[in-house]
Image (cartoon, rainbow, N blue to C red):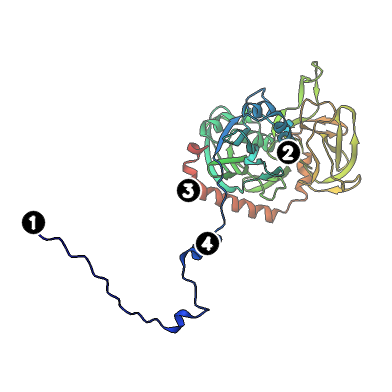
Amino acid sequence: MPQGPEAPQNVDIPVTLPAAAWADDAPDLSPLPLLQAAFADRPVQAIEPPLSTWSRDIAPGETLDFLLSEAGLAAPDRAEVALALGAEYDLRRLRPGHSVTVASTVDGSPRTVSLAVEDGVRIEVVFGEQMSTQVVAPDPEIVTLAGEAMIDSSIFAALDEAGIPARFSVDLAQMLGGTVDFRREMAGGETLRLLWREARVGEDRIGQPELAFAALEIGGSLYEIVWPDDGSGQATIYVDGEVLRVFAQPVEGARLSSVFGRRTHPVFGNVRMHTGVDFAAARGTPVQATAPGRVNFIGWRGGYGRVVEILHGSDTMTRYAHLSAVPEDLAQGQRVAAGDVIGRVGATGTATGPNLHYEVLVDGRPTDPLSDDRLAEAAESDADDTAALSRLAEARALLNENLGSEIAKTTTERL
């Protein structure tokens, strides 16, 4: 067997340290204070508990309280959320398609409640030591689109088949209804070219699209319409490149819900004469004067509700009824221009819902607002033909540019 290793021997080796090492002010190199200092400099971060998210669209007949109850909120929390949301948004305007999102902790305590409404707007309620509410509105991008439609039966059908918003047929009817008889003068095969603007957030469209330019050739005449982008709603109509008239819609982008003539009254149920046209729009939507004139009356007229009446010359008057409000600085005798805001859409008087009842009276007798030319003559006298022709040239160039772009080629696929 081999011999085991010898045990090590202790050898005393003298070690001499410098005097500075024993000084009273020498640093303490012990590790414990260093560790304590390192931990003291780092704040302890609270660990956020995981959140679970519940979200659903509002279905017909459902209420906000019902959805919050389904999301698991207790009655006191539901009441507080309803009050917080109601301070920022009229809950009577809730409708199918709006959505509610609730974020809660694992023990069911709500952290946030979000209500998504129209135009991408979201109202958020945040739970904490004090409940807070914020309104988040998107910053949309304005996109210009163009398209063509071949008319065989009607403008509405042609736009719908081409994938262009069919609601534009109402705007065209308002503009050309008193100038063109679509049923008699259109033989079929006419081409309608349109340019319009949309507000978008990502791939989602916000609000309603707005027409910018339309061109339609009927019976050898070229009719063109240019809508401004300044919010005035004052459109200019051209025939074969010359200004025909200027027209301002009473409610920009609204849906024509009832036309002039005999109809069954929606409230009383009997057949009676409808002396104007109705535009369905949300409460508070601006109402604009359709031609220059002088304010003749502001006040209340029975079933018409709150009314503004404007005189245009000696024989023509326009009436704007069911208004919810009138500008404080609008006064009787004041002159207004086409496109000036003279009120807000409402449901005052005898009305089934928010709408504008718009009348044109000539010598005190109601006439069809979509066919009478007197307002056009009043507006035309104020028109600047040089500026109008310049706007037409710009609109034509923009239409041709967008019809040739990729965004125009894929319009029907994206709408």
Q: Which is closer to the viewer, label 3 or label 4? A: 4
Residue at x 86% of width, y 27% of height: 303
Residue 280 picture quarter: top right
**Mark 4 residue crowding within 10 angstroms, few (<14) / some (14–19) / many (20+):** few
Q: Is residue 402 left or right of residue 277?
A: left
Q: Is residue 144 above or below residue 360?
A: below
Q: Position of residue 415 (x, y in %)?
A: 53, 37
Q: Which residue is mark 1?
A: 1
Q: CA distance from mark 1 to mark 4?
A: 55 Å
Residue 36: mark: 4
Residue 156 picture quarter: top right
The amino acid beneath tag 2 is Ala
Q: Secondary structure at mark 4?
A: helix
- Mark 1 and mark 3 lie on one chain; the one further toward the N terminus is 1
The amino acid beneath tag 1 is Met
Residue 405: mark: 3
- Mark 4 and mark 2 lie on one chain; the one further toward the N terminus is 4
Residue at x 8% of width, y 56% of height: 1
Q: Secondary structure at mark 1?
A: loop
The amino acid beneath tag 4 is Gln
The one nearer the camera, 114 or 34, is 34
Q: CA distance from mark 4 to mark 2?
A: 47 Å
The amino acid beneath tag 3 is Ser
